[in-house]
Amino acid sequence: MILIGERINSGFKEIREAIVNKDEDVIKEWAKKQADAKATYLDVNIGTASAKVDDFLWLVDLVQNAVDLPLSLDHNKIPVLIEAMKICKKPPLVNSITAIDEKMDQLFPAIAEYKASVIGLVMDESGSPKSTDKRVENAGKIFAKIMEYGISPEQLFLDPIIMPLKYMQDQAKEILLAASQFQLFSNPPCHIVGGLSNVSNGTTKKKLINRTFCIMLIAHGLDAVILDVMDTELVDAILTAELIMNKSIYADSYIEAFRK
Amino acid sequence: MILIGERINSGFKEIREAIVNKDEDVIKEWAKKQADAKATYLDVNIGTASAKVDDFLWLVDLVQNAVDLPLSLDHNKIPVLIEAMKICKKPPLVNSITAIDEKMDQLFPAIAEYKASVIGLVMDESGSPKSTDKRVENAGKIFAKIMEYGISPEQLFLDPIIMPLKYMQDQAKEILLAASQFQLFSNPPCHIVGGLSNVSNGTTKKKLINRTFCIMLIAHGLDAVILDVMDTELVDAILTAELIMNKSIYADSYIEAFRK
């Protein structure tokens, strides 16, 4: 499982303040804590804490120097993502692109050049899809476009767009079905990823709902997730789900082995 | 979700001794504890504690008088199951039949007469199936046979036969796919059930593995389960999985509401 640590995000007050105050220690600490918890990538999201390109580049460089992990570059401006890709020491995961031709044409040459990976959100000009079919249609558009640019399926992380259970209770089933179908585009398949915390927005049992939905997603092909990697029970559930899906070999001590 | 309490089973030493000694209090206590934990049915399995029909009838009567719940009659002899059905105050769930014509022809007239339900294990003369296809083929045989006897799909609980993860790690995926396909036999579909504890046989993380696989099964159509209904974390996971599958309506207090 590819675990993408969500914590360096200005949506968290502590991170926001650290970015505004250029407090390197707080950022480094969160980078290290997530690395210790076995994150595969660290997501770096400056959000509304600063609109300056240099501030995002400062944050990216700070994180990549704190830990020996590749980054998930999380920004809503394509030129900023491209600038950040240029300074990454390890091929990053670019978070994210949508199924809009103009945007893909702007980003994908750089993805190919820097041998990066990219999260493809299956939404388009009309917004977030509500049905399985629309999700698969948009995924197909992204898939066709990576082929044009010589980007391999292994570099693509399709995201079915996880919706909040509390407000859109009918969506989870559509998302699971969409994830299943994403696996059929190629062999070997592209990755399937989701921003897990979205499912529990506004609920009172966030960790339980995150964990339960994550298990279901893994049973439908998810092999990467943006998550709170410090949530031990969630990670234990993920390890168990992968074991059940026969993606890791059974050992009585499968959890201890991972943590070692 | 239909929760079938597994605890009155002579495989548990305490229950075995209570059966042998005709210690009614121990049995009653376990019946009440499972009822308090919101079991829908109580499984009653005398196992090797006694081969006498009268002892099984004593146990069945004891349990049904202790709590106001229907029973799951768990015995490997069809004539004994039929005798027990006759004394049940509420239509029981008969646990179980296999896809063998002679046995189904022996049991199904009584299922129809007593308006009982029946667990159909998707195995046949050749033993337990290893593939999805064989499971679905055997399920089809059972399904065709209930139709002959005027038994409705709602009275049938198809069991894909859960295998131990530790010894047959490739089986879980087959079981999930089989469960998905069982849903397609009719509309409304039959029930889909499993003996959950089997999956964690011999492992050191039984509860975590049970819980994780149960969530995956629910995402593939399971709507009934033979379980340790006293395992609160398992029941919480089940309630959450049903919420995600849109089978219950979201409320912040969905767990507290169930326990009330």
Image (spheres, coloured by chain):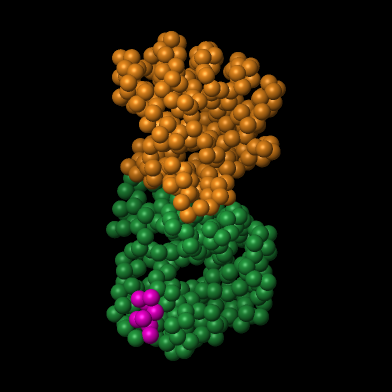
Chain colours: A green, B orange
Residue B198 or residue A87, whichever sits in front: B198
On the picture, is A142 further left or further right than B84? right
Evaluate whether residue A141 shows in this view.
Answer: yes
Residue A14 lies in the magenta-colored region: yes
Image location of residue A172, percent across then percent down: 57, 56
Q: Residue drawn at (41%, 68%), measured in percent from left and top? A: A5
Image location of residue B104, percent across then percent down: 61, 20
Image location of residue B257, percent across then percent down: 46, 46
Q: Which residues are magenta?
A: A13-20
Q: Residue drawn at (51%, 82%), measured in percent from left and top? A: A81
- Residue B172 lies, with reference to residue A120, above or below; the image says above
On the picture, is B117 further left or further right than B6? right
Image location of residue A121, percent across then percent down: 58, 69
Residue A258 lies in the magenta-colored region: no
Q: Quadrant of the C terminus of chain A?
A: bottom left
Q: Residue furthest front?
A: B260
Q: Main secondary structure of the magenta part?
A: helix
Q: Residue drawn at (38%, 18%), measured in percent from left and top? A: B48
Q: Quadrant of the N terminus of chain A?
A: bottom left
- Residue B48 lies, with reference to residue A218, above or below; the image says above
